[in-house]
Amino acid sequence: MISVWSATDLIPQPSCPACSAPAPHRKSAVRIDGLGVKRCPQCALLFLDPVPTDEAIGECYTAEYYSGDSWNRRRIGYTPEWDYHGERERALINGTLLGHSALASLDLRGKSILEIGCSDGALLFSLKQLGPSRLVGLDVNQVALKYGREHFGLDLRHDTLRTANFAPSEFDIVVMIDVLEHIKDVAAFFAEAARCLKPGGVMVIFTPNASALMLTRRRWSYLNRCLEHVCYLSVESLRRLGSPHGIVIERSWSEGYPAMEYPYRTYRIPRLARLLLQPHIALANRVNRLRFDHAEKRGAGVELRVIMRRAAMLPRVDSL
Ligand SMILES: [Zn+2]
């Protein structure tokens, strides 16, 4: 357990932020910062209770968010040694940038694309060659936006979805890569993203996979990092979020090993010596591997990838 929040940073969250179902919610796990992760029995959303206040959460979104300032180094996982933008540019050149292959599988010709939480805009830039008519990025990190404007020359805006005031049905495709887990009022945020989407349009969502926690419990790797996250979604919770807006899941899959490795007491000795000196650690990790290696195939890989589509004809209000 690490000390991250003070008592005044925390407020109770008695009802589900996605569907408003009241307590009781079952506690599924406890994060390394001591906050309980609860599961809504109605929509399967996992959410924090208590949850940090907006002010406390806001403290982590500094200009240095991606470069590992003092807050982030302990609580999120970005470090000063990590060349975030450089790594994204290398991934851009290699075609391995997060989200690129999912978007490239769609027909982007003539499409208008909004990326919410675009960071430096590298993903949008990677789509330019695929023929979209318009690329717009939103983010709140000025440093990432400045880097993106200088390197990629795109329409990258310092704004939030709530205040951007896009027209209804303005975009063919709305992209949210690692965004929803940061949002406290996730239902209102999703509704606003849905409002911007044309009938027949597509949403591309990447987010930590709540189903991985249900499989791995205390070993889930997200219990130990990214402590600015406030909720965790699954296929089921996204299906419920999309339903009132006529948005359905078209394709979903999961990626990545979901569990934390038990740490060796020292890494500065050869691998064989570690195995000999701490065989119980090696054995525990081996057992975990046997238990969780199949997680991706069961839809419980650590990261969830979902492509959703808005119905071409919106449902009539009286039929809802
Ligand atoms: Zn709920």
Image (cartoon, rainbow, N blue to C red):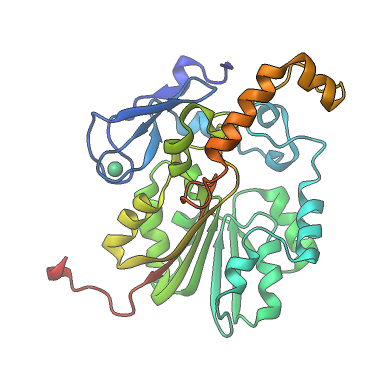
Answer left or right for 154 relative to 249: right
Quarter occupied by the C terminus: bottom left
Residue that extends furthest to the left in the rendered view of this protein = 318
Residue 208 seen in the figure? yes
In the figure, is residue 144 to the left or right of 207?
right
**Quadrant location of residue 2?**
top right
Residue at the spot x=79%, y=20% of the render? 274
Residue at coordinates 74% horizontally, 60% vertically from top-left? Answer: 148
Q: Nearest the camera: 160 or 304?
A: 304
Query: If the picture is divided into quarters, which one holds ligand 1?
Result: top left
Q: Is residue 130 left or right of residue 248?
A: right
Image coordinates for residue 163, horizontal then vertical, percent: 47, 56
Q: Image point 76% across, 47% down: which residue? A: 84
Image-based side of 199 in relation to 261, left or right = left
Residue 279 picture quarter: top right
Whole-percent x, y for residue 290 in the image: 57, 37
**Residue pictured at 51% horizontal, 16% vertical:** 6
Along the viewing direction, whichever of 184 and 221 lies nearer the viewer: 221
Q: Position of residue 75 (x, y in %)?
A: 62, 28
Q: Which of the image's four quarters has the N terminus? A: top right
Instruction: Using the rendered image of the protein, determine whether residue 58 is visible from the camera's viewpoint.
Output: no
Q: Is residue 150 above or below residue 53?
A: below
